[in-house]
């Protein structure tokens, strides 16, 4: 269940992805026409769903490579 008051609290996970797994995921992302970031985000979403059973999971990431303030709110490329 969502909180009544929206907060910006979160955490940054850290860990190591084995090179063999990274290569397989990179190849999969190429075949699917998706970015490596999109594949990893999807895997995190699937993992959270498996642990919580919730379908509405919000995953945020900071915008990168968007130098102009008007572009920060855009989704995707």
Image: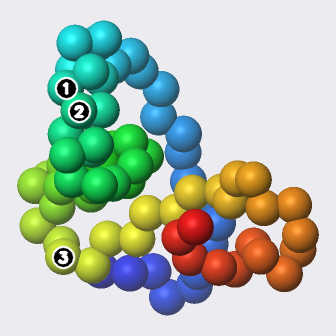
1 up-or-down from 51: above or below: below
Who's the residue at 57% across and 57% down the image? 61
> What residue lies at 43% left-to-right and 63% top-to-bottom?
59
Disc 3 versus disc 2: distance between alpha carbons? 27 Å
Q: Which label is found at residue 55?
A: 3
Quadrant where the N terminus is found in the figure: bottom left
Residue 24 in the image: state x and y as whole percent. Answer: 19, 26
Nearer the observer, 61 or 35:
35
Mark 3 or mark 1: which is in front?
Answer: 1
Say which residue appears at 62% left-offset and 72% top-offset.
Answer: 7
Asked whether the residues under the numbered discs 2 and 1 touch, taking CB atoms below 8 Å apart as contact, a structural biologist would say yes
Query: Residue 20 vs residue 73: left or right?
Result: left
First of labels 3, 1 by sequence position: 1
Query: In front: mark 3 or mark 2?
Result: 2
Is residue 44 among the parts visible in the rendering? Answer: no
Q: Which mark is residue 24?
A: 1
**Place of residue 68 in the rendered image (x, y in percent of width and height, measured from the top left):** 89, 69
Q: Are marks 3 and 2 in contact (CB under 8 Å)?
A: no
Q: Does the rendering let one see residue 56?
A: yes
* Residue 30 at x, y percent in the picture: 28, 43
Q: Residues within 10 Å of mark 2 (few under 14, many from 20)?
A: few
Q: Earlier in the sequence, mark 3 or mark 2?
A: 2
Please, what secondary structure does the residue beneath circle 2 have?
A: helix
Q: Residue most toward the right?
A: 68
User: Where does label 2 land, which residue?
Assistant: 27
SS category of the residue bearing label 1: helix
Relative vertical location of residue 3 with respect to residue 25 in this rendering, above or below: below
The quadrant where residue 23 appears: top left
Spatial distance from mark 3 to mark 1, Cα to Cα?
Answer: 27 Å
Whole-number angstrom distance, CA of label 2 to CA of label 1: 5 Å
């Amino acid at each position: 269940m969502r909180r009544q008051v929206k907060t910006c609290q979160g955490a940054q996970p850290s860990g190591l992805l084995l090179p063999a797994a990274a290569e397989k995921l990179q190849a999969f992302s190429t075949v699917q026409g998706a970015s490596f970031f999109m594949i990893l985000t999807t895997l995190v979403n699937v993992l959270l769903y498996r642990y919580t059973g919730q379908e509405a999971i919000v995953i945020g990431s900071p915008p990168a490579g968007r130098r102009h303030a008007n572009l920060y709110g855009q989704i995707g490329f």
